[in-house]
Amino acid sequence: MQGLMQDWPLLTTRFLTHADINHPTREIVSMLPEKAEKLGQFRYTNADMAQRARQCGQALEKLGVKLGDRIGTLAWNSHRHVEIWYAASGVGGVTHTLNPRLFPEQLIYIMNHAEDKLLFLDITFVPLIEKLAEHLNSIEHFVIMVGADDMPETSLPNVLCYEDLLAGEDGSYEWPELDENAASGLCYTSGTTGNPKGVLYSHRSNYLHTMGALSGDTLGITSKTTILPVVPMFHANAWGIPYATAGSGAKLVLNGPHHEPDILHDLIIQEQVTVTAAVPTIWMGMLQYLESTGKDMGKLKVVTIGGAACPRSMIDTFQRKYGVRVNHAWGMTETSPLGTIGSENAYIENFSEEEKLDIQCKQGRSIIGAEICIKDDDGNIIPRDGETSGRLMIRGPWVAKTYFKQDEENMLDTEGWFDTGDVACIGPSGYMHITDRAKDVIKSGGEWISSIDLENAAVSHPNVTEAAVIGVYHPKWDERPMMAVTVADGASITTEEMHAHLTGQVAKWWLPDDVVIVDEIPHTATGKISKKDLREQFTEYKLPTY
Amino acid sequence: MQGLMQDWPLLTTRFLTHADINHPTREIVSMLPEKAEKLGQFRYTNADMAQRARQCGQALEKLGVKLGDRIGTLAWNSHRHVEIWYAASGVGGVTHTLNPRLFPEQLIYIMNHAEDKLLFLDITFVPLIEKLAEHLNSIEHFVIMVGADDMPETSLPNVLCYEDLLAGEDGSYEWPELDENAASGLCYTSGTTGNPKGVLYSHRSNYLHTMGALSGDTLGITSKTTILPVVPMFHANAWGIPYATAGSGAKLVLNGPHHEPDILHDLIIQEQVTVTAAVPTIWMGMLQYLESTGKDMGKLKVVTIGGAACPRSMIDTFQRKYGVRVNHAWGMTETSPLGTIGSENAYIENFSEEEKLDIQCKQGRSIIGAEICIKDDDGNIIPRDGETSGRLMIRGPWVAKTYFKQDEENMLDTEGWFDTGDVACIGPSGYMHITDRAKDVIKSGGEWISSIDLENAAVSHPNVTEAAVIGVYHPKWDERPMMAVTVADGASITTEEMHAHLTGQVAKWWLPDDVVIVDEIPHTATGKISKKDLREQFTEYKLPTY
């Protein structure tokens, strides 16, 4: 027997319409890639954005966009990017956000694999795309996201001007009632092996992910929030924040191409930002800026940090000195991305400050709708004892079941769990702690050593600016840890000094057999340490303990 | 093209499982109908509840419950009621909560119409059901929700003991993966005309309603919340609170059959309740209790009030004197029930305290997922000017499309809106204000007079304890308002005194043509003023201005 409730498909445009009708005067402030403009000069309202997104939707239909067509975007966080983001999926297409930090060959591969029909790009990326254009097989039009006055000279074929496109439409358009399981977004993961793989979001998955993001414990968003998602929209949908702001009536602040601490700080102060989200390197820079200028963080209350782990000392300083709560979040492109959040639950409410900081260094607890568990190699769920680690698994309505154009490949286990490739444990408090990537874990004498724990402990040494640990062949132990570090200007560190520093922080048998100072530690396009590249650099290397 | 995200049906058991796995030690405290026990003596954890709900599920299957079977409950808010609530829908049945305050004939009609297969009842209601049993056509077993020691002597046939049922099962049970559109709950509205009508909730509608309830601006629930839903589970699912507590890890406090202010107050203080929800009469009683004892509200921070409008003075006192934020919520059985909430949005953030109080007297603003609008008699949407009133319409995934066993009757308009039967207006701030029930509005000379506004203004007179206004035939104006009032012991009021009191609060032409003191104002089973009964009492009445 079916229930007798309304059929109301869960669509991404629901959020935009909610904002338009219920919070029409709430502001969106955007910095623009094409102008060295005064800070926060461009601002308009939810009603304006909804109107322009409808105009954009009309323009897309005129350009022949049909159900399921992929629309690429290569753009910073800006009001125009949010407009096209809503419009492309709103008319039934698929918003495909591209990461400009990828290698050109990857961008070519991705756009051809996705068969993008249109590409919307910021003026910043015109030179990049001019170089690749001859290899792009499916793109019918390149739409440069500027007004007519700012249109550049370009060798690109079939170029259109974004503002001209919109000016040709009146916005009297109703978003179609699509199937909620229709594809709405596409984002490729830049895996460290093989070609990038596309995650194909549905309207339903984006809607439910947003409801998870809006729940009281997740990002801390209400109608009164002003939020600056420093995390880019091409990085797993800016963690769903542009949907969450529209769904809550929060004010959205967009930093365009600007990631410098002084500009971000000015924006936070001027716009009275209360919540923000970014990767740790951004906040590392911000902290240095604050310390050197003596400035404070204004009305900022919550920072959500994801993409990598934030050092304990940084969490502590932000909270004690600047009054900003730091929450780790963990997720992946395959998980839309929010899976866990580090906000305080009742279990730890009466813990000491130090115990709470320990918990905050973990990756957080399950958001309702994102089930997590840890499985051993035989596929059994490991108890939440806070010690036993294993494969981190996740399932739920905003987790991928397979990749784009790999429909036939089921990548879930028999119980529907997706293997994240992370090694983690979960404590009785519910907080999950990632100890490694499965492929980076060091297997020494049959036991596991966490490269991530070693790295986190190493960077708290004042001489060390970054650390990366890999397993290297050892005839007796099979693998032993080798630590590569970069050091501060003029500083140095020996293996013995590092051992002294690590002792007490990690088990004795975890101490790296060697510490090697390098000029630079290799990174992936999304700013993570590339252990694959590091291993390649050290192919010929032998441990001193060999 | 379909998205490639996981198939994860939205089921009510998701919340219970989330609580079991992520917040296993969080408490549920329950008062029991069968015992004059010490306050809060019964307490257990989410893990216990999940275990017992699974045992209950096993027992239901043994009793032959099949997909779609209706399971009646006639019970106060207690841990057992929540267990059966989850178990009945979890195994694929339909949890049918019955309101014990209905007239016996209505209860008989409803149970037969629903074809309840089982009835779970508190010991309190055994005498009531014994009297009705011979008229109940479908019930195979009566399950009394007590332990064996407390089982009463009864004339009921096929009686089972709840705790014995559970004791026979081990709880090693997995909730089936049902169709999310399957019926999960049933609740009848006690309309003022005709037979009661059943609203048939689906798993999906309950899931999405809960996510709406959990969003940061709605009920103010996080993992650290302790919530006492004084509102009964038979009153529109206790506004979804038992799902929301499980979904967030909040602590749930259940008051059993106790609604006396001193017991509720003791419970709030002892269990450190931070959030609660009830109808205004409960809070009226609480306020008198506080004023007469000089006590405070402990850690209570937010009260959500629904079912009727809360007087401005009461809102003001709770906030200023007791530090408890008062939010109106509006909804109906047909809307699961949450439609709007009175929490502060950014639009009114900088209003003066008085202006904010004005807004708080309204019924609140749209929760994301519950679309509202006001339509005129021609079906056109009226602008949100805060003045023009019309029919309040609502649509969304947790709004009914028709009633149980009326599948063929579409009760929505062509755009999918459900007519609430309320007359309201919406302001530019987004806050909605109900001015009347459509059938109670007084049409005087072609213009509308709000009976509710008149009543609210009248009760602020110190001599008046309750007021009800109805339209009475008038040869010149068609209808004119007549006000019936009850007065405080020994007090009195004349029409002239009421006019003096109302002047300045309402338009001059709204002043009632007569004020009549009555012993009692009739109420419906859910505690609302019954204008139908009042009109019947005054059938022969003629206005002095006739």
Image: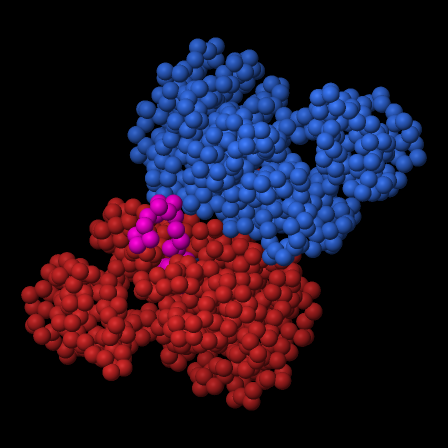
Chain colours: A blue, B red
Using the image as rendered, state which of residue B47 and residue A67 is in the foreground.
Answer: B47
| Residue located at (72% from left, 31% from top) | A462
Give x and y (percent) for residue A468: 75, 30
| Residue located at (17% from left, 70% from top) | B498
Q: Relative to B183, is B351 above or below?
A: above
Give x and y (percent) for residue A386: 73, 51
Give x and y (percent) for residue A135: 57, 15
| Residue located at (80% from left, 43% from top) | A504
Q: Which residues are magenta?
A: B328-356
Count of numbered tags: 0
Q: Is residue A372 visible?
A: no
Using the image as rendered, state which of residue B376 and residue A137 is in the foreground.
Answer: B376
Does the stretch in magenta take in B332? yes
Determine whether, in the image, residue B514 is placed left or right of residue B104: left
Give x and y (percent) for residue A285: 59, 29
Does the stretch in magenta take in B460? no
Q: Relative to B381, is B64 above or below?
A: below
Which quadrant, please, contains the C terminus of chain B? bottom left
Using the image as rendered, state which of residue B341 and residue A116 is in the foreground.
Answer: B341
Determine whether, in the image, residue A504 is placed left or right of residue B304: right
| Residue located at (61% from left, 40% from top) | A317
Q: Is residue B250 visible?
A: yes
